[in-house]
Image: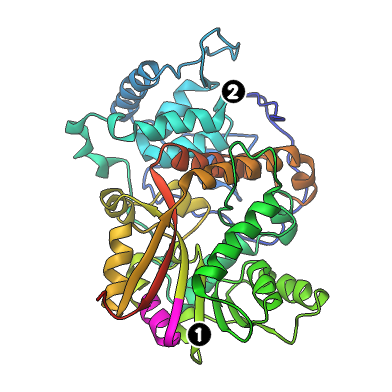
Amino acid sequence: MTRPVLTSEPRPQPAGRIVGIPHQTIPNSGSAAAPTACRADVDAGRWPDVARLPSAAPARTALARHFVGRALDRLALTGPATGVRSSAVGPRLTLHDPDAFHRRIGRHGLIGFGESYMAGEWDSDDLAGALTVLAAHTDDLVPARLRRLRGLWVSARPTADRNTRTGARDNIQRHYDLSNDLFAAFLDPTLSYSSAVFTAFPARSESLASAQHRKIDRLLDLAGVGEGTRLLEIGTGWGELALRAAARGARVTTLTLSVEQAALARERIAAAGLADRVDVQLRDYRDIEGRYDAVISVEMIEAVGAEYWPAYFTALRRALAPGGRIALQAITMGHRQMLHTAATHTFISKYVFPGGLIPSREAIAEHSAAAGLHTAADDGFGEHYAETLRLWREQFVANRAAVTGLGFDPVFRRMWEFYLAYSEAGFRSRYLDVRQLLLTEGTPR
């Protein structure tokens, strides 16, 4: 795997804006304290909380240095400040700017940890491996007596990120409308942006595209999609599931809020000669019209937000014709972890998926049952997502020059690599899972 050369030296910034998000900056964390330093190698207009170090808070910084340092030592993640590889086995962290690293964590917890990586203040010879070790010990990193004080370094989710009809459209566009070419730089040719299903690990003997088709076919089979099926898809992506469903003889209505995705999906569907079988609509799931024999939604619930899960499952139920079937693919986390995450502004909600929240299995069961739906099948395959993310991350790093050519600066590239590695670590540590579920009307007999 090709890895970027990372140093603490200033890095050149490409000219121009980030493709797909003109005049947009990532909002700051809302800290009232004035920053005391600014990194000259980071665009402060585009990345305000990465460019500006939080103001010095000696007590918090000292706590972070003590407890984080102890945790890194205990987990054998401590690396030499010089960046020289030691003889120790396993992933290592190298701190290029220890003071900034601890100051950010002391002020903003895990958001600060991610922003420090974006700023180039620390690095790892195995980013996903190091994050996996940390994810596997997430409950041990901070002593129990200090967890009660987590409000000192976490903040609530911004109300502006709520998934109202307007908010949901804005949130989706902030991620999926970055650039179709960006996603093409790390996804396989099917442009599937969800977990594949492999025959073996590591995935050396088959293509990612083949594994993605296996995932899609399992969902189509689960929903009973065949000749003449009226299928509703909530969350179009770039159209691959709709294409395979139409090739089976189904008539597909597929919904998205992403203008970029809708345009490319329509192009791909027309090129396949299936435009008469697939209707791509820019429509919110709350505005579904008609009844369908089958409904499929792939990793869409994570973008809905807990506040709107009742509306989501009610919409699924309302769209279902008598005797119909709903197939969902959903990322899940433990229920206790979900409750903590729901109340917290996280690195992912700030920089990657604003307004999103990964549900627990309990939350899915509760809200689907309240809508009159019964879970008839539930299959987990989290290790497949870890492998999918590994392949995406390796492709993204290998195509770093192409991403730069699209106008994305070094901070964005580090953010995106961190996001992919962070997600991979979640599945490798079993903190996260991904599941395919079959929902039907009514209650179990």
Residue that numbered label 2 is attached to = 125
State the SS at label 2: loop
Q: Position of 115 compared to 373: left or right?
A: right
- Find residue 121 and report its image quarter: top right
Name the mark nearer the viewer: 1 or 2: 1
Q: Residue at x 38, y 64 (%)?
A: 377
Q: State the extent of the magenta-drawn residues as a range.
A: 311-325
| For the residues bearing labels 1 and 2, Cβ distance under 8 angstroms | no
Q: Residues within 10 Å of mark 1 (few under 14, many from 20)?
A: many
Where is residue 20 drawn, in percent x and y? 69, 62
Residue that numbered label 1 is attached to = 293
Which comes sooner in the sequence, label 1 or label 2?
Answer: 2
State the SS at label 1: strand
Give the position of the C terminus as an image quadrant: bottom left
Where is residue 99 drawn, in percent x and y? 45, 23
Residue 281 to residue 32: above or below: below
Residue 196 to residue 201: above or below: below
Q: Label 1, label 2: how many angstroms apart (C-alpha)? A: 50 Å
Secondary structure predominantly adopted by residues drawn in magenta? helix
The image's colour scheme reads: rainbow
Q: Residue at x 59, y 23 (%)?
A: 125
Can residue 187 be seen from the camera position used here?
no
Where is residue 178 drawn, in percent x and y? 66, 60
**Mark 1 belongs to which amino acid?**
Asp
**Mark 2 belongs to which amino acid?**
Asp
Q: Is residue 316 magenta?
A: yes
Q: Position of 218 compared to 58: left or right?
A: right
Q: Residue at x 40, y 87 (%)?
A: 318
Q: Residues within 10 Å of mark 2 (few under 14, many from 20)?
A: some
Picture disc at residue 254: none
